[in-house]
Amino acid sequence: MKSVKVLGSGCAKCHATVDLVKQAAADAGVAIELEKVEDMAAIVGYGVMSTPAVVVDGKVVHAGGVPDKAKIAGWLA
Amino acid sequence: MNTPDSRLARWLLGLAVVVPAWVLIYGHLTQFADAMISLFGLSRETRLGEAVHFFFYDTPKVLLLLTAVVFLMGIIHTFVSPERTRAVLSGRRLGFGNVLAASLGIVTPFCSCSAVPLFIGFLSAGIPLGVTFSFLISAPMVNEVALALLFGMFGWQVAALYLFLGLLVAIVAGMVIGHLKMEPYLEDWVRAIQAGSAVPVDHAGLPWAERFAAGWAHVKEIVGKVWPYILAGIALGAGIHGYVPEDFMASFMGKDVWWAVPAAVLLGVPMYTNAAGVIPIVEALIGKGAALGTVLAFMMSVIALSAPEMIILRKALKPRLIATFAGVVATGILLVGYVFNAVL
């Protein structure tokens, strides 16, 4: 099971990203472990400077904006 | 049809149609506004007619300019990421570093909701506190929306002056904060943090079709968000333009009123809106005799010294550093206001 983390301090774009990831996982029929990271120290610990950012299996794959659906599907594949 | 080349061809074709159309419309704005008031059976001799004319002249003008500038900026953002800016700034010293940071603040994508991670990311890469602040002041204050609107409503001279003075405030305020050695007033968790190494966000090989797409996405995001503020601002501005008597503002926002500039700065702090809503009102006030320096100080204060941003930054800064930041920036804006009023 893939572990997906969405990093962001609770702005509207972060919520949009979480929803998109959930939907993409449901569409692809992939079970994921989704976690929302809001703690600033943890976010910075990933080396991320612009939120929302997405971490898949411990690796930052995206930062600074809502990712598009095709990209998310690519991470989950 | 979906190879990168064909997508690029479609973008270029689209731009080849849209750009001349843009230029054509932009060149006929007065005729459009004239046509609109005669459509309503109004005359510019009347107050209502003048207000309506103002509205129908300014609205398309501002929206056209804004769309063009925001589109370009969206493309520029695909070349400059915060990570890249950090790499450029790391190891720079006070002085030149501040100039560089303030300048990069104009073109680097920035959203106040990621101000804290960005702030810490910069510090942990060895960028001095003062240089980081130069970036943090310039990024929201000298932005493309403000510059596009100022250009549209007052001409390039005022836009250039705003750009120059905004950079100057950011550079000098950052240098002052740097010299005050405020590092102990960072929150403890910030000082203890070991940031992970920068995430490689590689935009270098991005095809142009995607850069254009990013520009358009930026237009949808920014223009989609600010247009109601612009319409409200222009409507209010139109009302002032048509109904407030000439020189009405001169009595309390004119050049000779010494307390007008500090009052404008104080008034701006609790207000939190984007440049888009303020500038049309500012234009109308100036038309009624308000001094340019006073209203520009008001505008800078609204954008650069907003209470919500202070609250976000409070997570990382102790109150004393927040107060210093606000005090130094406010002083800079005050000076800008007085200088503008004295020179013009």
Image (cartoon, coloured by chain):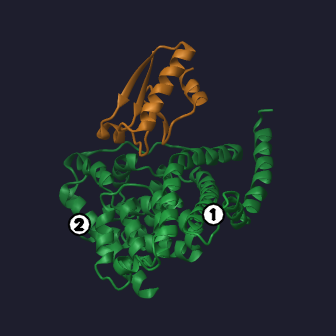
Chain colours: A orange, B green
Task: Return the mark for residue B153.
Answer: none
Chain to which mark 1 belongs: B
Q: Residues within 10 Å of mark 1 (few under 14, many from 20)?
A: many
Please say whether residue B329 is visible from this viewpoint: no
Mark 2 residue type: Lys
Q: Nearer the viewer, residue B301 or B45?
A: B45
Chain to which mark 2 belongs: B
Q: Nearer the viewer, residue B172 or B292?
A: B292
Q: Residues within 10 Å of mark 2 (few under 14, many from 20)?
A: few
The N terminus of chain B appears in which quarter of the rendering?
A: top right
Above or below, B213 against B245 in this view is above
Q: Would you name the residue on which mark 1 appears?
A: B57
What x and y, as percent, mark residue B336? 38, 77
What x and y, as percent, mark residue B178? 29, 68
Rendering quarter of residue B67: bottom right
**Horizontal arrangement in the rendering, residue B85 relative to residue A39 (left or right):** right
- Which element is circle 1 on? helix
- Which element is circle 2 on? loop
**Mark nearer the viewer, 1 or 2:** 1
Residue at image location 41% in from the left, 66% down from the top:
B299
Q: Nearer the viewer, residue B111 or B86?
A: B111
Q: Nearer the viewer, residue B87 or A27?
A: A27
**Horizontal arrangement in the rendering, residue B282 relative to residue A9 (left or right):** right
Mark 1 residue type: Tyr
Q: Would you name the residue on which mark 2 appears?
A: B181
Looking at the rendered structure, whether the residues under marks 1 and 2 are on a common chain is answered as: yes
What x and y, as percent, mark residue A59? 45, 31
